[in-house]
Image (cartoon, grey):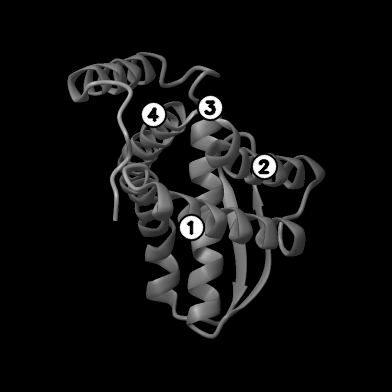
Amino acid sequence: MAKTNRILSPNTELTLISSLLIFTFLFWDSKIVFPIKLFVVLIHEISHVIAAIISGGEVKFLTFNLNLSGQTIVKNGNAVLLAASGYLGSLIVGSLLYLTSFYPRFKKWFLNILVLIILIVTINLIQGGVQIFLGLLVSAFFFIIPRYFPEFLANIVLRFIGLVSCFYVLADIKEDL
């Protein structure tokens, strides 16, 4: 398992990602961070879908809104698993975006699986024209990253999105309390 060839030194990369994270927190409520937040909401809702399927439930539909709320309507399924799955799934996906960026082979596999899941859910379960468009756009973005971005840039983007996704989960839990 070969690690990614580095173009940036570890210190430069750490400084760049840290600067991006500080910028993100300073502009947390701006439209600049909005696409990542919307991505996390989508993953949160898709995690409910996966939990419903695993626990024998039936998913009626999924929707998410531009106010960063979402809803997954499920019949049956394990209530505890369903309740915990949104935040847990978002945290896992954010962590995997970050971690797999260090391993090119795993990165491509993970992103292919992520794109496939988002596409299947978008086509079959998401309601609303804008939401379907955004689901397809997210799928296209994660399909394009490993194929057309320079590897060092793809890694920085994935690490940044992964870290912000993890932090957003924590911020969202705090807001819900």
Which mark sits nearer the N-terminus, 2 or 4?
A: 2
Instruction: Give the distance between the C-alpha atoms of the residues marked 1 and 3, in whole angstroms.
Output: 26 Å
- Label 4 environment density (alpha carbons within 10 Å; few <14, some 14–19, many ≥20): many
Give the answer, above or below, for where 171 lies relative to 23. below
Alpha carbon of mark 2 to alpha carbon of mark 3: how far? 18 Å
- How far across and down, in percent of the image, does residue 41 sit? 52, 45
Could you tell me which secondary element the residue under label 4 belongs to? helix
Q: Decide: is 97 above or below 73.
A: above
Left or right for 43, reference 105: right
Q: CA distance from mark 2 to mark 1?
A: 15 Å
Residue named by callout 1: 109
Q: What kind of residue is marked 4?
A: Ile
Q: Residues within 10 Å of mark 2 (few under 14, many from 20)?
A: some
Q: Assign a secondary structure to mark 1.
A: helix
| Identity of the residue furthest to the bottom in this view | 56
Observer-side mark, 1 or 3, equals 1
| Residue denoted by label 3 | 34
